[in-house]
Amino acid sequence: MTTKYQRFTRHHRQYRRPSVRQVLVVWATAGLLGAGVAHAEAEGDERPTVAPAAVMLSPVSDDAIASGVKRMVPAMVQQEGTRRAASAWRSALNDALLGQELGLVEYYSDEGTPIFTDADGFTSTGRRAFALLHEAPYHGLSHLQASLQDIRRLSRAMQSRVRDTFASATAGPDDLVQAWKASRGADNRLASTAAVLGASHEDFARATEAATLRAQRAAVEQARLEIGLASALTNMAAHMEHRPWIGGTLRDDQRQEISPDALWFAEPSPLESDTVEDLFEAAQQGDEVLWDWFEARLPRGEQYMGLVGAARHYAALCSRGGWEPVEKPWATRGRQWKDQERVSKLQLRLAQEGFLAEEPTGIYDDATVEAMKAFRKSHQIRSGKGTFDKEVAAAMNLPCERKLQIILLNLRRWRHTARTDEDTYIETNIPAMEVSLVIEGEQVARERTAVGSGKARWSPEFKRYRIPQATPIMQGSVSRVVVNPWWNVPGSIYEGEYKRKIDNDPTWLERNGYVLKPTALGARLVQLPGPKNSLGQLKMVFENDASIYLHDTPKKGWFKYDRRDVSHGCIRVQNVFDFASKVVVHDRKKQGRKFGQRRLWQMANANTSHTQAVAIHDPVRVFLEYYTASVDVDGHVRFHPDIYDYDRTVLDGPRTRGGRKRAR
């Protein structure tokens, strides 16, 4: 009687246990040889795989083993070369880190592994970071151009490197079989086989040494590319970071108002190692995550990114050669537009900056008039007209490269704006001569302003031209609104303008509503409240040491002009009662109280000699800043007059005595 055990063993004797040689071929051809297949796939090769079951059941000879191992010679030699050159990466990395910022050195000292590169060049993360670096010029970071060129050169060098085909490794079948058998039990049998062959066979030794040298050179190239890209990316992040300035009024050591460009002249602090790690982690998570990381560090609001778009547009225009100068107005009005060739050139010039969509017709038609109005408005030139005059010609003949420089300069200024995360604030752009009120993220008012005069005077004391009545760059918080204010005349204005008038005409004080009030140091000139007061009938007070206010004015005729730098430094606001009322109404609404939109005007006119103050319980932040290029609500770039010479000082150098005159 046959037992269950006998039936089981008889059934399984039909299948012979595979020999060592068969297992070897399975390993060599289907298992460990898979490393070679993977290597081949990395090289773009397509090799057929071997079905393990079919191999296990076939008889195997030494020739078959040798043939299987031989096919893996390239992978074997490459792996042994890489093993021998393993220390080359660390050495090359250390060399590439010499002179780099501390945060970068600390990161790679801890991690030690590349994230932007591999043996073939850029990883997907590296390609993502390199693409982002191409945005640097549109943020005014021209110093990174050289780094971009170096990175591009290193990348091309790695991609064009010729790989060894290992044709010289001609070990015979016996050598291959013995080397494979000798590596039995090794953790990495493929590498061990190559090591045995390298030690026992001259051709293999030569090929392995070549692979080692190639791996060492590749490590140096990769380390340079890795650190070059990482350094440029961290440098870009450091420069693009919003670094708001703090303090009340921007002044130098002599308490003289200075240009906003003093804020960005100094190099930014390098990134800390934790920030470097956050940046690199963002880079590995995808394009959107990487850009979101950068965007979170930029100034808030639409102006900055709008100017980046303008920089990209003008960079493209400049790369195509910019534009040809236009002739100044010719003949007399009414006849000058009969020259079709000249009109066509003018229309082409308008089209180049996007003001005219139609093809040149040579006729100064309605479309051309509207395009001219848009051009004049965008350059703050008597925008109501649609005519071509000397002011328009001067603006049109400003080179493309100069306009791009102005945009990039203003981007640098924006990265130091004092604005941070406020959603309710007052902002005055001094060159635009406008003030805006933003409440809970929405612009609710925008008014024309008159700002400090741009007239320059030579200062023997400071050996340079100064603009003594320039409105300073400053920030503060509006804490109260005063109706029918007094005006304490600053000593500089009294000495420079009023003292001579008072000395020459004893009745001047009374006729103009001034009185001299005694003080411990003498007397102070004060103008009484009323419609003729230089501050008008309302001022918005924010604490500062320069006696600057947002205020009304009895000289409202100035607001009809496009160029309005006429004050002693304060900000005169058109329709100031409506503007201030919106601030007070919002403040009272937050307290659950009501305040009539016309109440301030009623208070001021009920008794014009009676001064009253209205407190702002939650003071509203106010910023006085200087931007000669901005973007309107439609996304169109606008250029404003450089009234205080700040642009020209940076781009052309400071004005010397007898040098250039103040431009429009």
Image (tube, rainbow, N blue to C red):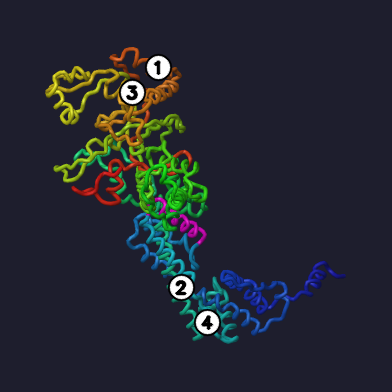
Q: CA distance from mark 3 to mark 1?
A: 15 Å
Residue 480's label in the rendered image is: 3
Camera-nearest label, 4 or 3? 3
Q: Nearer the viewer, residue 17 or 90?
A: 90
The residue type indicated by label 3 comes to Arg
Q: Indicate the position of residue 166 as horizontal and vertical percent values.
A: 53, 80
Q: Is residue 135 left or right of residue 625?
A: right
Q: Earlier in the sequence, mark 1 or mark 4?
A: 4
Residue 220 lies within the magenta run: no
The residue type indicated by label 4 comes to Leu
Label 4 crowding class (10 Å Cα cut-off): few <14, some 14-19, many 20+? many
Q: CA distance from mark 2 to mark 3?
A: 72 Å
Name above or below for residue 330 compared with residue 192.
above
Camera-nearest label, 3 or 1? 1
**Location of the N terminus (image quadrant):** bottom right
Residue 516, by quadrant, is top left
Dot 2 corresponds to which residue? 215
Q: Is residue 129 left or right of residue 544?
A: right
Q: Earlier in the sequence, mark 2 or mark 1?
A: 2
**SS of the residue under disc 1:** helix
Residue 134 lies within the magenta run: yes
